[in-house]
Image: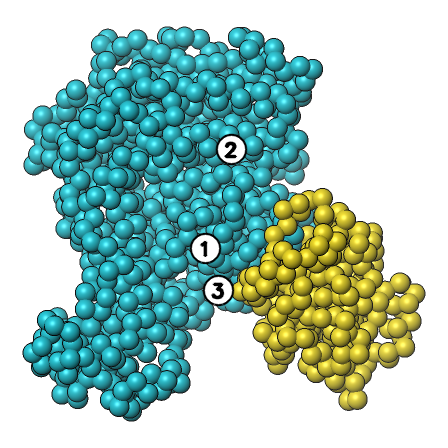
Chain colours: A yellow, B cyan
Amino acid sequence: MAARPSARDAAASLNNSATSAGGDAQNAANLKPIQVKLVLLGEAAVGKSSLVLRFVNNEFQENKEPTIGAAFLTQKCKLDDKIIKYEIWDTAGQERFHSLAPMYYRNAQAAVVVYDITKPASLDKAKSWVKELQRQANPNIVIALVGNKLDLEATARGVPREEAQAYATEAGLLFSEASAKTGDNVMDVFTEIAKKIPLDQLLASRGRAGGAASGSGAAAGGRVDLNAGPGGRNAQPGGCAC
Amino acid sequence: METVDGDGMSQPPTTPDDTGDPSPPPRPKIERRKTYIRTDSAPCDLSDPTMTSDPASLPIPPVETLQRSRTPPSLLSARPSLIDTPDTRSLFPSSAGAFVGSLPMLVKDEPDEGFEEVGLNDEGSSSYSTASEGCTVDDRRKETGEQSLKSDTPMPRPPPPPLDAPSTTTLTPLISPHHSFLLTRSGPFSPALDDGLLNLDLKRFWEWVLCFCVVNFDLELGQALECVYPPIDFTESERKNISFSAFPDSNSASHVGDSTFTFRMRAGHFTTELYQKQQPPPLAMPTALSGTTGLHPGAGLPVDTDGFSYGYVFFRQQKDTEIRRGYFQKSLVILTPHPWPGLFVHLISELGPRYMDALVEDRQKAGSDLSVTSSAAKTLLETASFSIAAWPSPPSSLSPEVAYYPISLTLPFLGEATRYSFPPTARFAQLFESPKPHTTEAPPSPDWQTAVICTPGKLYELFAGSLELLWVCWELMVVGQSLLVVAESPKACSEIVWGLVELIKPIPFGGDYRPYFTIQDSDFKGIANRQRLPTTATVIGVTNPVFTKVLEHWPNVIRAARVSHPKMSSDGSTQGKSGGLTPKPEMWSPTLPRAQSPSPTVGRPKNTPNNSPKKPSILTFSKTPKPTPSKDIASPTCGVSDAVVVESITCKHKPYLSKDRKLIKEVVEAAIRGKPVHILDNMLRRHFIDLTERFIQPLNRHFESLIVGNPLHMTLSNLRTRPEIKPFKQDTFLRTVEQQAGSTNLPVNCKRPLSDLYRAFLLSVNFAAWLQSRTEEVYREWRRRYLDVLCEEDVASWAIERLNGTAPNRLRRRGSTGDVECVDLLLRIRDEVVKYSPYFADAHVPQKHVHTAQHHHAHMDLASSHGGWAHSLCAAAPGPSSPGPVGVMGGVVPTREQYIKLKRQLEVLVGVLPEGLRGAVVVSGRRGGGG
């Protein structure tokens, strides 16, 4: 659960600085990573941390330990000509941590609300998270509803895909079923989010603050290329298996 | 110039903890016409192993003092010597190391073992700091003897101390009466909470923070330490210090609302064990829990400490009808070994309000049902702890990586990832704009974020109305005078004290400082002695008016005042040029009557020490507060200043240097133009960094001339763990200064001979502290080079040359010298491997590398097949249970990579050695281990 993005970041930004130095102004603006705060919410044991781990490290741990409080991870991604740096806050699902959630979704641009396709009750919890987000979070927040554990579909599905899909459409959410274990659709979730976030707006607002933005540049090792995205089955994040 | 108690040389002066002595030797009283106070703490025996945390490493170059061997204060007493008095101890006899009901449930099974362990460990482990101790060696021994005596006798399990027994009226249901330390297992959520504590990586957590403390103001009991998370075995005096330091101690009515401030207190035995002696703390953790701490026997935390704990407090006082007297008064404290107010005040001001809200929320949920534990508040602390335990290790001088620039780390905490900038060394002066963020751990976040400065120098904010006082303060601090800082609030006095310490960096302040000091502090008797000044330079921040009476004899008093309304400066020079800009009056919250702080007058009779007729004229420097610019940019550090500024200084100091009026003018003009506060802070800070650096430049030059040799010349044949540093002869140095008089290098003019200022500095604790930190730096440099040579050089070729007698020139005789040299190298590497094995228990030598080394020499095939030899060699060494403490001197811990390389080198070397020799080494190693 420990988030130690430093080493990777260091490498990435080292690579970047060289590139960005050469780029013209327009390029440089685009290549500046756009920071996106993303929060994961959902009932305990639906696989939030596993989804993140698959996305960030492309790995999967059977019987992962429960998250306490929240974990923080970062992942840089490339979408078209933009670099996105996901700042991921992976929260604990237990009810007792519920009261802490606002500080994680405050100012978040994106939320991934996860449920377990084998547990109908977890969808109910997901719905209540969605409701809370829509009521209290940043009004422009992009919410993705994700049914995890798709690998158990054949044997233990408890929530029909159509039901969840219908709910998501009605509530205006991105929707996907995924498996952290196999990696199915995991990348897609983050790609779709990236596409839906008003990146240009974010970039513009950051641009003012970050006059002195240090090295940031073209795709480097340790970064996911979301362009490989939707088709990218089994989540083979380009070169980010670190 | 100064006269000290004449006897001098042999008998160390008594330290304040010898209060048993009815007639303490006369302290130097306030001298007349003198501009400094002698700070003669006792010389310490440098060779005394108890004095140092790294016995092997301490030959600091002797100092030849000016005229007496006992002055200046010895290096090791550079830091303060204020010790809780015997009466404190007798009041709380169990404080020497008993378990005060910590972890009741968890410990229950094995409480007595814990006791014994403490008793046994107690040898030499007085709860005072080691290297920062100011008491004499003899005192220490007495101290130690006393303590071990005490601990040898079976200690009754102490009854729950009154302080922590909360009354039932306590509003927070956090604790059950006798389990005040314990957050766990007290309610329906307990299983999960236990998991929380069990899963917390305590070792990583402790690297940053010792614990969180919640202090409640209980109607029956007063300040009561309600909960400590994670549970810590505090001594009674620590509990008391924390409790009282966490609350304002006067004028409580003026503190309605939230407030953050800091305090500094002498570390107790737990903290000392953990951080300074680098040993696992004597907290009797159940097996399950200790298993998760990651603390192996002997594995310490490579954390810089000065023997003090720093408390960062969030205090809330608000009306609350649910409580009997209608007030909610509670504090949350982060206790840590790190003097980084920028970081921790930021954290506590994030966490504190949320925690208090959560408590109230919990109460509302629970209603009157106290059996329902407060979940939200507990969960919050737990979450905060987990965030901290997930951080990378804090920057440390014990790390072999050298940093010359601020170190930048991005630390996620409660939903925000904030970038912090850490000073590379304790005496590094940080500016608000880090010039070129040079990072070792993590680069600044690509979309650039202003870093929170961990040791901010908010010089403008603190001296906005009285900029010219900065130069007097600088002189007083540099020459190590004791200073009393009187303010209305703990926040104001603590910020000013920090500001004073920052002011003279890169000179390390060698004295004692207490940003917020209360009359209940266990060091009160030592510091606030009516008869004499503290034995070492002491800077304390106080709010209680009692101090101005008790410390009447202190010559230097700084007063802070809340500015109630902006007044134009009397000289008008600042306003005249400003043009249309008018200051915003609303910035100064007109809250307190000015009567609280005496109006700036010259020679206030009321507060001046008038017990000494021989006193010179009292100078009061003061200035009507000037308007500050609008604070449109919130200070990136400790939150927003309450517009409490230094108002006046009463002292009898005759300045050596003149002020830089041009700079004052520039700053004031910049302020009027509305420049952000941190820019103004930096303008001043740059000047004082420059001033200080130029001031110590001759000292640096002299010191560098004392170092013999160059670590870069070190090779395998010429290994030296430490440099040779010749004695610092003060008179030689002063002669140089006097010779160069007239050609001053300082950015300001001198009013008096500069050599006098140097002389005063040499007599101060700061000189000792400076010399010590310089020495440490040189030691570390050599130590780094030493590790480098051991790790990187081709030991195989080197050893074969020695063994075959093909070594150049001087090593012709095969068998004798060559063998000895090889064995010496082998033992050196082995010692490193063994010493640091607890740190890297999981570091294995990849076999592959051993093989890659093989192709150099035919001999090398032994390496792989005789890996077992290296193992038995290590096993024969003195066990890893006694790796020795990691002191600051030469205490550079190898990196994981270096450690793996060392192990590899060991294998390689063993492979090269003839079998007979190897066996001999193992045997001799074993013998060495026995002895």
Mark 1 packing: few (<14 Cα in 10 Å), some, or many (20+)? some
Write the residue at 23% across / 32% down: B762
Q: Nearer the viewer, mark 1 or mark 3?
A: 1
Classify mark 3: helix, strand or loop.
Answer: loop
Q: Position of residue B922 (x, y in %)?
A: 17, 81
Q: Answer with the quarter of the image where residue B1 lies.
A: top left
| Spatial CA span between label 3 and label 2 | 38 Å
Do discs 3 and 2 belong to a common subunit? yes
Question: Residue B229 has which mark?
Answer: none
Q: Which residue is mark 2?
A: B682
Q: Is residue B702 above or below residue B470?
A: below
- Chain identity of mark 1: B
How many numbered marks does the figure carry? 3
Q: Position of residue B701 (x, y in %)?
A: 26, 39
Write the residue at 23% across / 42% down: B703
| Spatial CA span between label 1 and label 3 | 15 Å
Q: Answer with the quarter of the image where residue B706 lies.
A: top left
Q: Which residue is mark 1?
A: B394
Q: Earlier in the sequence, mark 1 or mark 3?
A: 3
Write the residue at 53% across / 39% down: B432
Write the residue at 24% across / 8% down: B613
- Chain identity of mark 2: B
Q: Which residue is mark 3?
A: B201
Q: Position of residue B569 (x, y in %)?
A: 55, 11
